[in-house]
Image (cartoon, helix red, strand yellow):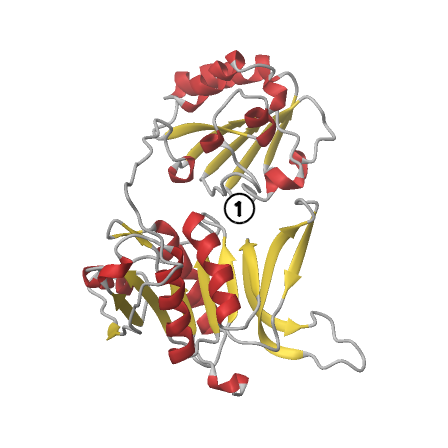
Amino acid sequence: MGLEEYKGVFIFAQQVDNEVSSIALELLGKARDLANDLDNKQVTAVLIGSEVVGLTDILAEYGADRVIVVDDPELKEYRTEPYAHALSSVINEFKPEIMLVGATAIGRDLGPRVSARVHTGLTADCTQLDIGDFPLVAVEGQEQRHKQLLMTRPAFGGNTIATIACPDYRPQMATVRPGVMQKAAPKKGAKAEVVDYNPGFTPNDCYVTIDKIVKEVSNVANIQDAKILVSGGRGVGSPENFKILEDLAACFKGGMVSCSRAVVDSGWKPKDMQVGQTGKTVRPHVYFAIGISGAIQHAAGMEESDIIIAINKDENAPIFDIADYGIVGDLNKIVPELTKKIKETA
């Protein structure tokens, strides 16, 4: 089968409890950008679950031209085997050129298994996707392929950034970190072509049985939803000293506190508050980086913020290289004074 038979950009539209996950809408926005750079501009969402056909409209509003629905009682809860069978069957039947999956707990389990079944490569945890030439720079004696999916991700523990392509196999598959891509503005009332497809499901030894589902209750707000983030690093000094960051965040409607990995590793704050390569990727309107050095692992999770304000006593801290505004000095003096001034002008 020739590579030219594979057309279109597909995304796995993750849903949990019959609610479309935010990552699916983010992937639709990016899929539209990629499709516009290709000859075939169709964007397809693959919706897998039980009694999920009612979710097709929201996928259409966020950019899906077509929704392939795999609906079966075996797919009510996520289980690796039936979901992998469903998605790999869709790929074999409809032959997408590009297949995007969210790098969620579900996607990180599903993506590699599906790529192995359809005999293609997978680039995991991508932070950037583009259409371009590969190799990036023409090499004498080596064919340069055009209109390839260029998949960029942190590598070697986040110490470098790698751009990877899959020129010889299809589909070109990637899992994409949540919070990195932007949702497109929804078009109310938009409709998509809905295709029902069921490859059939026969339980086998790989089908696990779910006896009980226990939902974790978290009291920590989702920092990815914040418009203003006040983030602290090891330089804050102590968990108690995060109080001054909380006071600053409280000055803004919807302001939240987040932190670096060093803070989580020290046991000062929970993992849910961590920004960075091994934490969450955020894109707030304003990001305060307070007492954070700005190593590449942290920058990977926040560098797309609209405005970055850094406060650090080390004038050579890498955070100042990506900050829009920087203040060199003692955060214990600067942050309370900043909070005071903001309150006075509110």
* Residue density around tag 1, few if under 14, some if 14–19, many if 20 or more, within 10 Å: some
Relative to residue 125, is residue 22 drawn left or right?
left
Q: Which residue is mark 1?
A: 304
Q: Residue at x 60, y 54 (%)?
A: 153
Relative to residue 164, is residue 85 drawn left or right?
left
Instruction: Name the residue furthest front.
Output: 205
Q: Of the residues shown, which amino acid type is indicated by label 1?
A: Glu
Q: Nearer the viewer, residue 340 or 160?
A: 160
Residue 290, visible in the rendered structure? no
Q: Quadrant of the C terminus?
A: top left
Where is residue 2 drawn, in percent x and y?
Answer: 53, 87
- Which secondary structure, mark 1? loop
Q: Residue at x 57, y 61 (%)?
A: 123
Where is residue 53 drawn, in percent x and y?
Answer: 20, 63
Relative to residue 150, is residue 178 drawn left or right?
left
Where is residue 311 drawn, in percent x and y?
Answer: 60, 25
Q: Nearer the viewer, residue 67 or 228?
A: 67
Q: Residue at x 57, y 17 (%)?
A: 334
Instruction: Name the residue furthest right.
Output: 140
Q: Nearer the viewer, residue 289 or 222?
A: 222
Residue 149, visible in the rendered structure? yes
Q: In the figure, 289 relative to 53: above or below?
A: above
Q: Residue at x 49, y 40 (%)?
A: 280
Query: Quadrant of residue 9 in the image?
Result: bottom left
Q: In the figure, 273 relative to 154: above or below?
A: above
Q: In the figure, 62 relative to 93: above or below?
A: above
